[in-house]
Image (cartoon, rainbow, N blue to C red):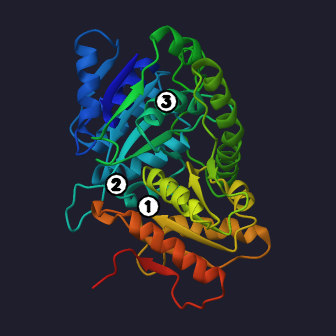
Amino acid sequence: MRRFISGNDAFAEGVRLARPHVISAYPITPQTTVVEALSSMVEDGRLQAEYLHVESEHSALSAAMGASATGARTFTATSSQGLLYMAECLTYVAGGRFPVVMMNANRALALPWNIYGDQRDSLALLDHGWIQLYVQDNQEALDAALMAFAIAEDSRVSLPFMVNLDGFALTHTYEPVDVPDQAAADEFLPPYVTANKFDFDHPVSLGYSAGPEFNRYYAHAHHRDMVAAESVIDEVEERFAARFGRRYPGLVEAYRCDDAETVLVTLGSIAGLVRDVVDELRAEGRPVGLLRIRYMRPFPAAAIAEALRGASAVGVLEKDISYGAEGTVFTNVLSALARRGSVPPVRDFIGGLGGDDITREQIRDAFAELERAAAGEQYVDPVMFLGGAA
């Protein structure tokens, strides 16, 4: 069915199709309409699930973890300060290997208070052991909801999954979206089965401790399986394409990068505008490209190094800043480029903080800066705030 819906509604439709057993909900702008839509689906019978309206974001993830520990397919959602309030629980869920799926509506962090979208909330929590995907549009949001459960619940992975949607730019923007029927979704995503649960017949310890002599084994297994998620992502996307006809590019999407001399790397919804600017500049005869990072964890270092192998200068456009250093995406991309053996000039373009517009002209200016860098122009500080700073 073709529908004209917001990003939040699209994601809620994807969750409905996944048939979660438990939904734990607490409202926070701009995520609220996701759990409101799911509440209506449970109320009118379109979704058979236990809907828990809890008292805080911390409780929302705690409840999701408890439900997952019984073998239930679980979902929750949050944003910004709510995600930070969950931080303690994030490591519990990941360390317990509970494949909870959570939608995060990317939003600026306080202070100052701001309800609009940047990506500082989720990027601040990359080290907490969750798979992290950043979607570009509402169709990808719906499809990601289904694929997230399939990836997270795979026995080779068994890790929680955070799907990130840019606040308001996607969550409250309406686009045409294809909504699969339930039968097709059921064929793609079978019922959840796991041995990692409370079981009176086959007891296991789920809240274990591990001292210095054993802790590293758990950390190594967690890292190993996060890396293994790369191949599972590819497999799930192939199955999805075969069933629904929509194909996704894996951990990264390289657009016109093969012969590009300058490439701008980004993630999330801004990639659409960057793609348009790339086409404009190509029409002017300028060899530019776009690399969209879809997954920040597992981090696609090898794919990034390969996609940027011919670039003479690289820019990272991100809605994040690690104060006193640089953007988190820039740090990760720079590490990936080091695998090439030589690192080209790299610039970090910081924009979109607190929902500030990133304009077409700013993107063109960023490419112009990269062209100057490729030509050998020297610079002191690679971090550049779009629009300037007082």
Q: CA distance from mark 3 to mark 1?
A: 25 Å
Q: Are marks 3 and 1 in contact (CB under 8 Å)?
A: no
Residue 93 versus residue 273 in the image, above or below: above
Q: Which mark is residue 84?
A: 2
- Residue 143, disc: 3
Identify which amino acid the numbered label 3 is placed on. Answer: Asp
Q: Is residue 249 above or below residue 200?
A: below
Give, as a three-letter code, the residue at label 2.
Leu
Q: Quadrant of residue 203?
A: top right
Occupied quadrant, residue 113 = bottom left
The correct choice, above or below, for 354 with respect to 2 in the image is below
The answer to whether the residue labelled 3 contacts the one labelled 2, judged by CB atoms less than 8 Å apart, is no
Task: State which mark lies toward you, 2 or 1.
Answer: 1
* Left/right of residue 297 with respect to residue 6 in the rendered view: right
Residue 213 visible to the viewer: no
Extreme residue toward the front, this view? 284
Element under disc 1: loop
Between 332 and 3, the one lying in front of the other is: 3
Front-most of residues 60 and 279: 279
Q: Which amino acid type is marked by label 1?
A: Ala
- The span from disc 3 to disc 2 (Cα, nearest Å) is 26 Å
The answer to which of 342 and 156 lies nearer the viewer is 342
- Judged by depth in the image, the label closer to the viewer, 3 or 1, is 3
Residue 98 falls left or right of residue 258: left
- Residue 55 image position (x, y, % from top left): 20, 38
Residue 59: give x, y in percent of width and height.
Answer: 30, 39
Give the residue at mark 1.
124
Considering the image in quadrants, where does the N terminus appear?
A: top left
Q: Are marks 2 and 1 in contact (CB under 8 Å)?
A: yes
